[in-house]
Image: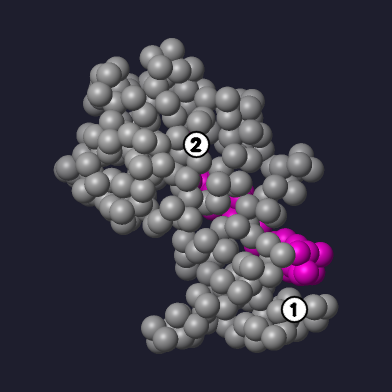
Amino acid sequence: MTVNLNEASAPLILLDIEGTTTPIDFVYKTLFPFARARVKDYLSRNWDAPEVQADLIQLRAERSADVSQGLNPPALAAVAALKGESSSEQIESAAAYIHWLMDLDRKSTPLKAIQGRIWQEGYQAGELFGEVFDDVPPAFARWRRLYKLICIYSSGSALAQKLLFTHTTAGDLTGYICRYFDTTIGHKIEAGSYWRIAEELRLATAEIVFISDAIAELDAARAAGMKTILAMRPGNRPVELPVNHPAADSFASL
């Protein structure tokens, strides 16, 4: 299906990453295993870093919520033990809880922050290269010629988003992107998150087109007043048709 993005009423394109600009397999078969294998090493080297301490405190609060909901998460070191020199037991417990969250594919802000910093080390060492679909770079260039603004909204941290688009196999694409939004603005299945994004950009929600492979996210964006497009990419999870959103299998058709 061809969807017209040439309209002056839609000056901004807001993009999901996983299953939209980037193959799902890259996220689940490359990025997630890379971070998972390095969590304990990263924690042991950076335990006293303020950002890690802040993440661990948030993770402990998240674990308490898990327990209150009747879940059975792994134990996590007590708050008092989060300060000062780490022990192997503390690192093991923190890593076990992080792995548990990853197994659930939890869209946890502190989890995503830790993953992002692990990936940063991988990109900087030349061990990771971001993947995008072949139609993404020419679409970015075409949208720029049409004076469209491009922003990203992903459950991955803003740092992780920037790293992926900086180090793609097609080159650095960050010059096309004006803003990055993550779960610090709100969760992607909540309409309020999309209102806040529009407020940050000083646009009406009706001036924004959101493209994602997730129906729940598109429903939330549309409830906030945004235009929506369903990304139907190779490797994406099956979607029961028909859906109440225009669909496209390539950015070339937009």
- Residue 239 location (% of width, % of height): 27, 48
In the displayed structure image, the side of residue 194 where residue 85 appears, left or right: right
Q: What amino acid is labelled 1 in the image?
A: Lys
**Disc 2 versus disc 1: distance between alpha carbons?**
34 Å
Where residue 227 appears, as percent x and y from the top left, is: 25, 35
Q: Can residue 195 be seen in this view?
A: yes
Element carrying mark 1: loop
Label 2 vs 1, first from the N-terminus: 1
* Figure check: 227 above or below 141: below
Helix, strand or loop for disc 2: strand
Specify start and end residues of the magenta stretch as a single range: 21-49
Residue 117 drawn at (x, y percent): 68, 53
The quadrant holding residue 118 is bottom right
Q: Name the residue located 56 percent from the left edge and 71 percent from the top edge.
A: 58
- Crowd around label 1: few <14 · some 14–19 · many ≥20 (10 Å): few
Q: Nearer the viewer, residue 61 or 161?
A: 61
Image quadrant where residue 174 sits: top right
Q: In this view, does 148 lie to the left or right of 58?
A: left
Give the crowd class for mark 2: few <14, some 14-19, many >=20 residues within 10 Å.
some
Number of callouts: 2
Report the disc number at residue 179: 2
Residue 74's quadrant in the figure? bottom right
Residue 83's mark?
1
Q: Can you say which quadrant of the picture contains the N terminus?
A: top left
Asked if residue 111 is positioned above or below residue 83 in the image, the reply reads: above
Outermost residue to the top = 145
